[in-house]
Amino acid sequence: MTQSGNKRWTLCALVLAMLGPAAAWAQQPPVAAGGNGIKVGDGRLHPFFDVETRLDTAVGYFPEPTTADPNAISPSLSPEIVLRLRPGFKLEVPSSKMALSAAARLEYVRYTGLLTKQSTYGSHLEGAANLTAHFNPEGQVGLILADEFTRSDQTRDPSLGAGVLSLFNEARVSVPIKPGGGALEVTPQLGWGLEFFQPIGLAVPVGCTEGVCDPVAVDAFDYTNLRAAVDARWRFLPKTALVLETDLNLREYLRNSQTPSALLLRAMGGLAGLVSAKISVVAKVGWGYNFGSSGGNTLIAQLEGNYLFSPTMTFKGGYLRTLNPVAAYGLFQDNRGYAEARALLGGKLVLHGYSALDFLTFYDPTQPRSDTVLLLDLGPEYQFKPWLVGAAGYMLTTRSSSVMGAGLNFTRHEAYLRLTLVY
């Protein structure tokens, strides 16, 4: 590992040592709350273990086995059968003085080499954890200390190509203030996050002419993000509220002077609540403005509807328009349409489906770029016993970009079988 790499991982280790375990639990499969668990105060600790086999058609870039040149790289992402092993735990300790919740998992991702021989060198560790301590949760003034950590092949930066491993950590402190009877709630928050990148393989994809599609060069986009936010909610009806969300993000890149820093202010306001016994709506509109040197501003908004078809079946759909800092270009705008459905059948079988279509526009006028990303995720999950859950699923990712390069233009199919043991 290079000296800069050592400094990067050392810095993250110090953050974790100071702030404790944490996790972005997104991208992690849900864990059933079955089993008795281990009693911890008024709460329960639930250890679990996942075993998953996944057919993934786009794990990374590796040498082409059908050519005489051992250094020749496959022109497209390589397929592989992947084994994922995930031990972990979930903890919930309710309390009127300090409510504690925590979760953690360690994941070993083994590329078996059955479909792409050289892929075994890309086997790696992933993981996630979270820790939230809520002091005085029932009082007029509370304090929440939280930290989230994740190491995953799903990065938070949409400008980067495939074949990248991300290590992300964010620490947050927030102060919920509920004067009077609690109809009004104001929550100031301060967060500090950082994200580091490294390639899964050591090969540059065919057609790559820019750093954003080159996994080998992605550590140039490591960044820190300081975020200050204030959220307010006023329930003027029992189940309907006026909401206001504001945040200010200072994004700095650690070693890439070509990426402009961002000082992005976003503010949205609107309504959230029930319009009938079965239909709830979120409607917010606002503006995003970058005070950084690269400039940029636009309308931001969200419109979402939830329909409770029955106590065991729900549907959700909506549109989201956001503005966010991003590597290489400074800012990007995302216009997303999404839909989701969930159903519980017989008390044990859960069916889920999710789809999203994103139109991404990157702001740098010297490097005009637009991407289209389609996501599809569906499958069943069945609880055989309170301590045994089986799941299967299919995920589709299709991405096309105005920037050339296989890492930014691909279709990825993933089919998996998963077994979860939880105590």
Image: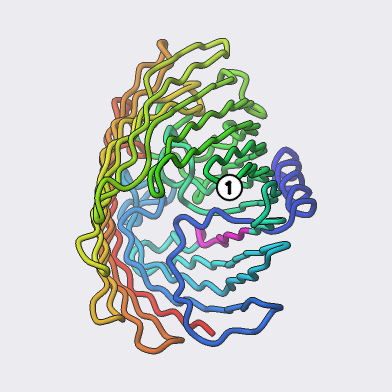
> Which image quadrant is residue 43 in?
bottom right
Q: Eyeballing the image, is 324 above or below 149?
A: above
> Which image quadrant is residue 268 in?
top left
Q: On the picture, is 22 further left or further right than 25? A: right
Work out whether residue 376 can be spotted.
no
For the point 35% across and 63% down, the residue is: 80
- The crowding category of the residue bearing disc 1, from other C-alpha atoms within 10 Å (few below 14, some 14 to 19, many at least 20), is few
In this view of the protein, which residue sits in the foreground, 369 or 263? 263
Q: Give the range drawn in magenta.
A: 121-130
Q: On the picture, is 35 further left or further right than 377? A: right
Q: How many labels does the image show?
A: 1
Q: Check disc 1 and report the residue beneath it.
A: 181
Q: Where is residue 412 in the image (x, y as percent from the top left)?
A: 29, 51
Work out whether residue 57 can be spotted.
yes
Reply yes or no: does residue 349 show up in magenta. no
Q: Where is residue 240 in the image (x, y as percent from the top left)?
A: 38, 44
Q: Position of residue 423 (x, y in %)?
A: 54, 85
> Which image quadrant is residue 223 in?
top right
For the point 27% across and 63% down, the residue is: 342
The three-letter code of the residue at mark 1 reads: Gly
In this view of the protein, which residue sits in the foreground, 120 or 103? 103
For the point 79% across and 51% down, the residue is: 18
